[in-house]
């Protein structure tokens, strides 16, 4: 176990940014209920939290209403994942912690890696 702690429901890992025509566009999982600005503790809820599974198909929506298929990374953060500054998990691995960036995308997950 490299990350320890509890999720504060900030919603950062259920949303993200993708580059479209040179612009960063926000994208959110269809199941993400947003009560406060994403990034604040307790800002969000997952509508299917008790039923979500690793790799479960989800749709990610952009502000303009368009969407694309992705997959839920229900076990985030894994040891190979980077985490955003707002994430409440802390790194306790012996290796170097994976580095976060705004365009970060895990190899499987909701931060845009599988666009069909
Ligand atoms: S289904 Fe997965 S990606 Fe979507 S809000 Fe729930 S935990 Fe986040
Ligand atoms: S980024 Fe971290 S604290 Fe925020 S919702 Fe994801 S796992 Fe929870």
Image (spheres, rainbow, N blue to C red):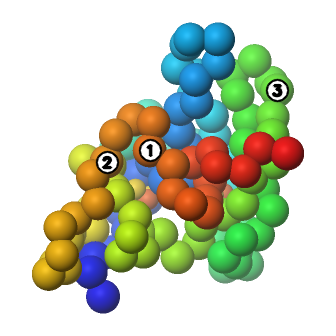
Residue 9 in the image: x percent, y percent? 43, 59
* Residue at the spot 64% in from the left edge and 11% down from the top edge: 21
Q: Is residue 81 above or below residue 14?
A: below
User: Which is more foreground, mark 3 or mark 2?
Assistant: 2
Which type of secondary structure does the marked residue at label 2 adopt?
loop
Residue 69 in the image: x percent, y percent? 81, 48
Question: According to the image, label 1 marks what residue?
Answer: 104
Camera-side residue of 69 and 95: 95
Camera-side residue of 87 and 80: 80
Residue 56 in the image: x percent, y percent? 76, 69
The reply, left or right, for residue 79 in relation to residue 62 is: left
Residue 14 visible in image: yes
Q: For mark 3, does the 10 Å Cα neighbourhood hold few (<14), some (14 to 19), or many (20 or more) residues? A: few
Q: For mark 1, does the 10 Å Cα neighbourhood hold few (<14), some (14 to 19), or many (20 or more) residues? A: some
* Residue at the spot 52% in from the left edge and 20% down from the top edge: 24
Q: CA distance from mark 2 to mark 1?
A: 6 Å
In the orientation shown, which residue stands out farthest toward the bottom? Answer: 1
**Tag 3 or tag 1, which sits nearer the N-term?**
3
Residue 76 in the image: x percent, y percent? 48, 69
Dividing the picture into quadrants, the one containing residue 74 is: bottom right
What quarter of the picture does the N terminus occupy?
bottom left
Q: For mark 2, does the 10 Å Cα neighbourhood hold few (<14), some (14 to 19), or many (20 or more) residues? A: few
Question: According to the image, label 2 marks what residue?
Answer: 100
Q: CA distance from mark 1 to mark 3?
A: 21 Å
Which type of secondary structure does the marked residue at label 1 adopt?
loop
Callouts 2 and 1 close, C-beta under 8 Å: yes
Rendering quadrant holding ligand 1: bottom right
Looking at the rendered structure, the number of numbered marks drawn on it comes to: 3
Question: According to the image, label 3 marks what residue?
Answer: 66
User: Which is more foreground, mark 1 or mark 3?
Assistant: 1
């Amino acid at each position: 176990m490299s990350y320890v702690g509890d999720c504060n429901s900030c919603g950062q890992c259920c949303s993200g940014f993708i580059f479209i025509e040179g612009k960063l566009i926000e994208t959110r999982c269809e199941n993400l209920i947003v009560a406060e600005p994403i990034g604040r503790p307790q800002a969000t809820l997952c509508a299917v939290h008790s039923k979500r599974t690793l790799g479960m198909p989800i749709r990610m929506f952009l502000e303009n209403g368009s969407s694309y298929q992705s997959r839920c990374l229900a076990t985030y953060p894994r040891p190979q994942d980077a985490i955003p500054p707002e994430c409440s998990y802390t790194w306790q691995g012996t290796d170097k912690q994976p580095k976060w960036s705004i365009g970060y995308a895990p190899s499987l997950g909701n931060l845009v890696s599988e666009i069909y």
